[in-house]
Image: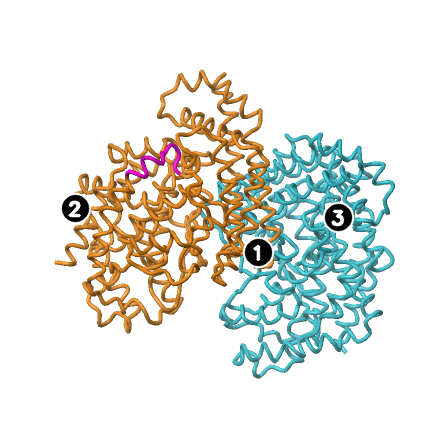
Chain colours: A cyan, B orange
Amino acid sequence: MSEVRYAVLRDHLAETWDLVKLGGLAGWDQQTMMPAAAGAVRARQLATVSKVVHERMVSDELGDLLEELRPYEESLDHDSDEASLIRVTRRDRDKELRVPAELREEQTRAGAEAFPVWVEARRTNDFELFRPYLERNVELRRRYASCFEADEPYDALLDDFEQGMKTAEVRKVFARLREGLVPLVAEAAGQDVDDSCLYGHFPVEKQREMQHVLLARFGFREDSWRLDPVAHPFAASFATSDIRMTTRYPEDEMRGVFAAMHEGGHALYEHNVDPALERTPLCRGTSLALHESQSRMFENLVGRSLEWWSWAYPELQGIFPEQFGGVSLEEFHAAINKVQPSLIRIEADEATYSLHIILRFELEQDLIAGTVEPKDLPEIWNERMHEYLGVSVPDDAHGVLQDVHWSRGTIGYFPTYALGNVISVQIWERVLEDVPDLYDHIARGDLGPLRDWLREKLWRHGRKFTPRETLERVVGGGMDPEPYLRYLGTKLGARAA
Amino acid sequence: MSEVRYAVLRDHLAETWDLVKLGGLAGWDQQTMMPAAAGAVRARQLATVSKVVHERMVSDELGDLLEELRPYEESLDHDSDEASLIRVTRRDRDKELRVPAELREEQTRAGAEAFPVWVEARRTNDFELFRPYLERNVELRRRYASCFEADEPYDALLDDFEQGMKTAEVRKVFARLREGLVPLVAEAAGQDVDDSCLYGHFPVEKQREMQHVLLARFGFREDSWRLDPVAHPFAASFATSDIRMTTRYPEDEMRGVFAAMHEGGHALYEHNVDPALERTPLCRGTSLALHESQSRMFENLVGRSLEWWSWAYPELQGIFPEQFGGVSLEEFHAAINKVQPSLIRIEADEATYSLHIILRFELEQDLIAGTVEPKDLPEIWNERMHEYLGVSVPDDAHGVLQDVHWSRGTIGYFPTYALGNVISVQIWERVLEDVPDLYDHIARGDLGPLRDWLREKLWRHGRKFTPRETLERVVGGGMDPEPYLRYLGTKLGARAA
């Protein structure tokens, strides 16, 4: 009998997840394929599918099913797919129920209204234009946070992206990171590395070819993925066999390959979830930080390593002979690892990136707590950029207005980027323990052993376990910034030596 | 008060239509962009969105709204958007309610199972392999037809594609067509037209360029459309500002331009529905025959005319100088209008095409009435192909197995293709009455006056009126095969002379 009711739950969730994925497809299409004039109707279509999904999640039908299945769940092994699906769905539903529909809708509307104003404000370098919209978004996020019981309001926001994570934990990790990174960056930034080979003329077609050469080694199953150019790269999946990576091909530089490898890491995670979880809410990565740990791993730990390029560089030289024919592998490797404090987060190198994030994390907490008001942001932003990165911000377009997130009302998302950096190296150290000759494989362009390890320990579980449980399973403990600081220290120190 | 309830109906239908369009997008993506391995999950996603849409259509909520709005509807002008939306929705809902959910699902399942068998049967020229699946599809369609009250069972099937059309009417039109076409085709087929210029080597990139040159003249609004290659071209729309045409670029011939213009005609109809009908079930062409009248008009009446090519041929010669440099406009025009009876419907010329359809229409009626059984189809097919087109069918792969429709259980669709031919010329004659210098415009590549006429008389109304009402408004009467026969007689007679 319980099995019968479980099957009803499974079918109900499968259909909900089908709708979620169709919404995802419409979002992907919006950024890759959709004719521009269709934007207004598409926004309505996306809002409708979100609404229908929400209605299914808060429905009495689902609530009753979950209640009925309580004894069944308790009879099952915690780690079973069945217990996990019931457990995670109950948690998701409880969160959906906490927030009044009107507040959800107001947030969506406010974000939709603020976004174009932010675009204009950034273009014209006019923070005051954006300020009232930002104030409204912050106020709505405060109200959203108040729907939940938490140690501090920011916890509730963080939870949307990193379920169960506490602000206090992140603060502790980031305090140590900041302490370690600021002197490291200051020292590395004094070094003189020639990265001029990364700039020049890189025709789109050749960039596409190179990115496909690299991604072909990532080991996606045949006929399961595609790669398309967009303004702001992302990865999406609509089934484990339907992986959509996006990238960019700016013609004046070749850093698009790192965007492609970054999205490739995200994509491998989604691609390798256990197919038994297909068409369920468990069929995706467990959190943004865990996800980012994978994108950062493939972008940086693999993708900026000397070993990876020892096989890939001849390919690159073959495709861009004029650009790289006279540049040695070592010179190229130094160029792609150059540390240089800069103004823009999305252009930051591996070492300075986390400092951009820490700055945002601090400001977000202050905004939600009310200890900083939006009007004060530009001044504080510019002061801290100088303090952490030693750079002077010339204008708000290159400062507080640079990121899209706040215009959409997205607060609590930023920290997951830096946590991904931290976790990526924690995992990497574990892989190296189990696969001592990992770098020999990478030097042959063979990611098989890495992939096998990650699939077994992380990817296949999808969202069955919380981020904390998942990390515990993969690295045997919680978040720890020391491996990341050691890694950067060794890497940058080695270069200095 | 009524206005308030109407607004509720409008919102309910807008959301339903959003879901319909997201399903449409997923179908488009399946054929254009989707990695092949994703097919199985995509099929489930499409089934889910169909189910959710069906549930919304048969819901008591919608039923109650429609009942409440009866007095409001009666107080409104029949032609108003509001009255039309209520009227058409009531009709749609009544149809949805007639068919038991189990029968719908069994039909979908049977079609999904039969399709791959048909693919294999066609590949191996093995009708007997396909026969039991076809028998099941026919049996299910008979059961489906019995859910409705109609003069004859085939009426119910036809109604799905051509609402309100009666089989008896189609029979009458087709009898006259057959009578007129068989001798016309026999005579034209005796003529010796050299169409060798249409075969050779046509690189994909150059075909793409040419197709864009032609479609640019169709007058789509900026940033509202795209064109992608597929195996079997179609047109879709997800908003009036989101038009997706598809085409093909076979490298050994240049007939892809006609596929593009055909889909361009469908696309213009969807693109020019009154934006006030956006996000409602009225926001699409009123029937398949009316839709096909537009695709055939732009493919044939415009796209195979001497006037159209008098501006477009220099463009074609510029893009394919080796192929067409030594071919005169008149020779090219004769080649693209060559009449030659052949085995395959989708490769048929303008004159023989309707005979392929008449054959299928006759067999479908017999199958549904039970006067012909699937096992007898190959023999009858081959006999009639000889009778109507004078060709001998070498095997079933080039005969009864050639079309996908019956494998999906789609019966009642074929006649709309030929009705589209008939209607296209009825409309064309009306346009010429109102725009006597139409061909002068076309000869300059200017489709503006044609577009303006069609938008005003046909396109903008979308699905507000039934096919019969719509045709009455556009041509002032019902279906009449004489204009089409006159047109072909003049065209082929002129060539013979």
Q: Secondary structure at mark 2?
A: loop
Q: Residue at x 72, y 51 (%)?
A: A277
Q: Which residue is mark 3?
A: A162
Instruction: Same chain for labels 3 and 2? Say yes or no.
Output: no
Count of residue discs: 3
Q: Which residue was labeled with disc 1?
A: A232
Q: Chain of mark 3?
A: A
Q: CA distance from mark 3 to mark 2?
A: 68 Å
What segment is highlighted magenta in the picture? B162-172
Q: Is residue A342 magenta?
A: no
Q: In the rendered structure, the residue with mark 1 lies on which chain? A: A
On the image, which quarter does residue A138 sit in? top right
Relative to A152, say whether A189 is above or below. Answer: below
Chain on which label 2 sits:
B
Which amino acid lies under the numbered mark 3 shown in the image of this protein?
Answer: Glu
Q: Amino acid at mark 1?
A: His
Q: Is residue A208 visible?
A: yes
